Image (cartoon, grey):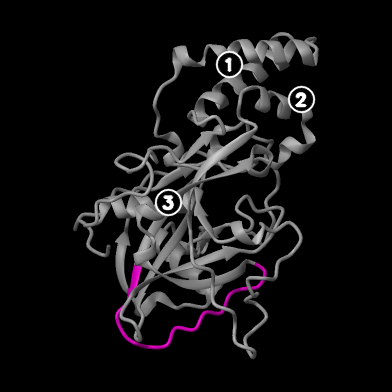
């Protein structure tokens, strides 16, 4: 997996009023087993974080002190989040094309993935930052293959929590057949229990805090991070993506409606109906709105198109966006 073309992908320009973030794919060889390992973290529970509780690569937003250097951002954030100094590691460069997404309520963001490998047997203790990281652990790369990807389902309000405060919009989602969302996920082996004298920064798998995922969903790789890993595999000598173009077993799209169709179709119908309801005919009753939604929903087959949009960004980018909210000072 560590064999990549010599020429790196081009850097995606930052959009107007956008921002940048970088994450690090950190590899090392287990000195005991000889297995190639990849570092993952699980983000701490934070209601202000769109990726609260999700499995991810270490990384975060670019700071002015990074000098618009994406790799420097990945290295700084990795040291801040898990205590790894990557300056002595071999740099693999930009591993994939950048992803451009728009998290709910946030500005457009360009995310870059950089690779690093430790070529010595030195001990690499992980020291997760408690306010940002709930778990940090090494995963063998041989369990990250396409045969491990599976479909999972969640209520759409779990993907988009603001729906809980918008009952009419929630009803529209259900009428469009998008009340539940199927998503591609790769279950990871959970982190090992910490030793008795370990820092409380690393919680045992049985623990958990209010607002966290259930234990069986806590260590699922999905969304943006799954897309980044998939793109890296596609570009490497493996040439075997997990999702998106070229993926096997029907995972050409990362998100689908509960009925099995592309989620993008439901999102288009939902957006069109909401626009008509709020701007053109604001006096519609809920019953009339649902009738209109169902009518539009029947026309989906006339305009259905295959798209790779959801394999390149989080599904939240296709849902109606919330108004811009101030970012917390401590956000990663």
Q: Earlier in the sequence, mark 3 or mark 2?
A: 3
| Residues packed near mark 2 inside 10 Å, few (<14), some (14 to 19) or many (20 plus) | some
CA gap between label 3 and label 1 equals: 30 Å
Q: How crowded is mark 3: few (under 14 residues within 10 Å), some or many (20 or more)?
A: many
Q: Distance between the residues labelled 2 and 1?
A: 16 Å
**First to last magenta residue range:** 116-131
The residue depicted at 39 percent of the width and 26 percent of the height is: 306
The residue indicated by pointer 3 is 149
Q: Which residue lies furthest to the bottom in this view?
A: 197
Residue identifier under label 1: 297
* Disc 3 element: loop
> Does the magenta-highlighted stretch encompass residue 117?
yes
x and y percentages locating residue 96 in the rendered image: 33, 52
* Residue 309 part of the magenta-drawn span: no
Q: Which numbered mark, 3 or 2, is in the foreground of this view? A: 3
**Badge nearest the viewer, 2 or 1:** 1
Q: Residue at x 35, y 86 (%)?
A: 32
As helix, strand or loop, the secondary structure at mark 2 comes to helix
Location of mark 2 (residue)? 168
In the rendered image, which quarter is residue 54 located in? bottom right
Task: State how far apart marks 3 and 2 are (Cα).
Answer: 34 Å
Which is more toward the observer, 42 or 189?
189
Pick the residue in front: 167 or 133.
167
């Amino acid at each position: 997996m560590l064999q990549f073309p010599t020429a790196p992908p081009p850097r995606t320009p930052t959009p107007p009023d956008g921002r940048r973030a970088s994450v690090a794919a950190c590899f090392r060889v287990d000195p005991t087993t000889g297995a190639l390992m990849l570092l993952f973290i699980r983000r701490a529970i934070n209601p202000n974080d769109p990726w609260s509780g999700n499995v991810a690569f270490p990384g975060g937003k670019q700071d002015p002190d990074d000098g618009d250097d994406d790799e420097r951002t990945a290295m700084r954030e990795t040291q801040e989040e898990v205590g790894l100094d990557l300056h002595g590691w071999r740099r693999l460069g930009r591993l994939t094309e950048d992803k451009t997404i728009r998290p709910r309520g946030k500005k457009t963001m360009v995310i870059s993935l950089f690779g690093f490998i430790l070529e010595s047997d030195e001990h690499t203790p992980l020291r997760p930052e408690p306010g940002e990281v709930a778990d940090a652990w090494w995963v063998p790369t041989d369990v990250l293959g396409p045969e491990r990807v599976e479909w999972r389902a969640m209520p759409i309000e779990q993907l988009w929590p603001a729906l809980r405060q918008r009952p009419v919009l929630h009803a529209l989602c259900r009428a469009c057949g998008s009340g539940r969302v199927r998503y591609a996920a790769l279950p990871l082996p959970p982190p090992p229990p910490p030793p008795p004298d370990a820092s409380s920064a690393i919680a045992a798998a049985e623990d958990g805090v209010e607002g966290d995922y259930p234990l069986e969903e806590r260590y699922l790789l999905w969304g943006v991070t799954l897309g980044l890993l998939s793109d890296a595999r596609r570009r490497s000598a493996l040439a075997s993506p997990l999702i998106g173009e070229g993926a096997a077993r029907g995972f050409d799209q990362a998100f689908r409606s509960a009925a099995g169709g592309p989620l993008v179709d439901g999102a288009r119908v939902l957006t069109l109906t909401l626009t008509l309801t709020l701007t053109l005919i604001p006096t519609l009753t809920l019953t009339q709105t649902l009738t209109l939604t169902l009518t539009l929903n029947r026309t989906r087959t006339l305009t259905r198109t295959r798209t790779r949009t959801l394999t390149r960004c989080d599904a939240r980018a296709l849902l109606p966006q919330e108004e811009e909210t101030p970012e917390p000072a401590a956000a990663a």
